[in-house]
Image (spheres, rainbow, N blue to C red):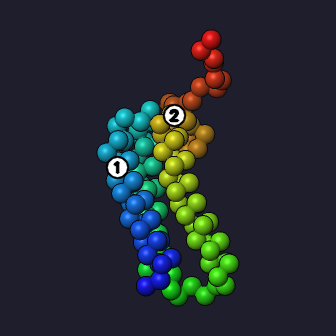
Amino acid sequence: MKAIDRRLLWHGMLLFLLGLLTGLAEQNFSNIRMGLAAHLEGLMNGIFLLALGGCWAQVRLSDAFKRAAYIIVLAGTYGNWFTTTLAAALGTAALSPITAVGHSAPTTITSMA
């Protein structure tokens, strides 16, 4: 197994664990339904990285494109989980109006002066 395969598998397990931990903290989010979505994003993206790590040896790209694909896949999967988790913590409604019924984030930031 090559190093990039192992790193994808490692990141898959880490993101899966982050999804599980997000599920434990779900009741503490401002928007609980969005917290459930964040939990599922972590689990599903972790499984996706595990599957991709398992078949990465079959990917036929040049080294530069393989590196770029690796970086883009990691940025996309972690970014997806993080954005959904942040939306759940802030109680925003714009990311997913269906799961955000009755929630909204503050429209302005007030200074503490």
Is 70 displayed left or right of 6 in the figure? right
Q: Residue furthest front?
A: 3
Of the residues under marks 1 and 2, which one precedes in the sequence? 1
Q: Residue 33: in sight, yes or no?
A: yes
Disc 1 target residue:
21
Give the percent coordinates (x, y) of residue 1: 43, 85
> Where the C terminus falls, by quadrant?
top right
Give the percent coordinates (x, y) of residue 34: 46, 43
The quadrant holding residue 40 is bottom left
Give the percent coordinates (x, y) of residue 58: 53, 88
Disc 2 target residue:
90
> SS at mark 2?
helix
Q: At x 63% / y 17%, what residue is drawn?
A: 111
The quadrant holding residue 27 is top left
- Graded by Cα atoms within 10 Å as few (under 14), some (14 to 19) or many (20 or more), the crowding at tag 1 reads some
Q: Residue 44: in sight, yes or no?
A: no
Give the percent coordinates (x, y) of residue 91: 50, 34
> SS at mark 1?
helix
Up the image or down, 46 lies above or below 80; here it is: below
**How many numbered tags mark residues here?**
2
Is 3 displayed left or right of 93 in the figure? left
Q: Amino acid at mark 2?
A: Leu
Q: At x 51% / y 38%, what residue is drawn?
A: 100
Q: Amino acid at mark 1?
A: Leu
Q: At x 46% / y 56%, what residue is drawn?
A: 41
Asked whether 47 or 112 is in front, the reply is 112
- Graded by Cα atoms within 10 Å as few (under 14), some (14 to 19) or many (20 or more), the crowding at tag 2 reads some
Q: Residue furthest left?
A: 24
